[in-house]
Amino acid sequence: MSLKGSLAELPLADLVEMTSLGRKSGRLTVFDEDGAVHGVLAFRDGRLVGAVCGELGAEKAFYALLALRDGGFDFDPAGTLGDESCDLPTASLLMEGMRRLDEVRRLRCELPAPARVRLLGGEAHGELEARALGYLGPGARRIGDIVEGLLVGGDADEYDALETLRELAARGVVRVETPQGEVEARDGAPGEPPQPELER
């Protein structure tokens, strides 16, 4: 029997947990608050066997969908994705996904979207850091703009993007500037507002 509902009444994390514990199989379509398809998850015997959300790989797509708070869902026990790209334990994914959501909330306060990042000098460690530094020229760029850019065309999500900026700031490669002054990324700035344009 199919199941439809609102994410406000039954959060995706709870729905995924029910699917895992009940060892259910089927396709779970997730809609945003405007009713457009935001992504799809496929389960077999309670394990995640496929996930689609933009250009993200299966695991990152799962985490991105988990962050959606408003919208709806439609679980079809007879549905499949056609391309089952993974076979992952749902309980472990759910625990990691909740940890990442908590960390993103902390990072949004530490590195607010309106703050600006200025390149000081140094080398990138890895592809994502190189991409982040590629957005910085002689001036400064808003964190929100850098994060949005890193989400396009790669296998990075908001957690990856913010963690990359935090690492660069911690090593002194970049400086984070807010209207109140510089932010030491490793210490955090709990009084800063979250990134409104990145809220889901």
Image (cartoon, rainbow, N blue to C red):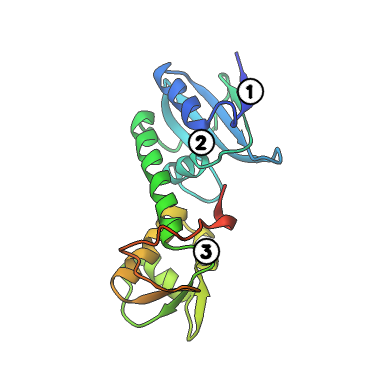
The quarter of the displayed image where residue 71 is located: top right
Q: How many marks?
A: 3
> Whole-percent x and y of residue 53?
54, 44
> Whole-percent x and y of residue 93?
37, 36
Which of discs 3 and 2 lies nearer the camera? The answer is 3
Pick whichever of labels 3 and 2 is earlier in the sequence. 2
Element at label 1: strand
Q: Amino acid at mark 2?
A: Asp
Q: Amino acid at mark 1?
A: Lys
Q: Amino acid at mark 3?
A: Ala
Which of discs 2 and 1 lies nearer the camera? The answer is 1
> Whole-percent x and y of residue 32?
64, 40
Circle 3 sits on which residue?
113
Circle 2 sits on which residue?
83
Q: Depth check: 90 or 190 in front?
A: 190
The quarter of the displayed image where residue 155 is located: bottom left
Pick whichever of labels 2 and 1 is earlier in the sequence. 1
In the rendered image, the vertical position of residue 179 relative to residue 16, given as above or below: below
In three-dimensional space, the C-alpha distance between marks 3 and 2, rounded to whole angstroms, equals 36 Å
Is 134 left, or right, of 72 in this rendering?
Answer: left
- Residue visible at 34% across and 69% down? 184
- Residue visible at 43% across and 25% down? 17
Pick whichever of labels 1 and 3 is earlier in the sequence. 1
Q: Depth check: 176 or 73 in front?
A: 176
Residue 156 visible in image: no
Circle 1 sits on which residue?
4
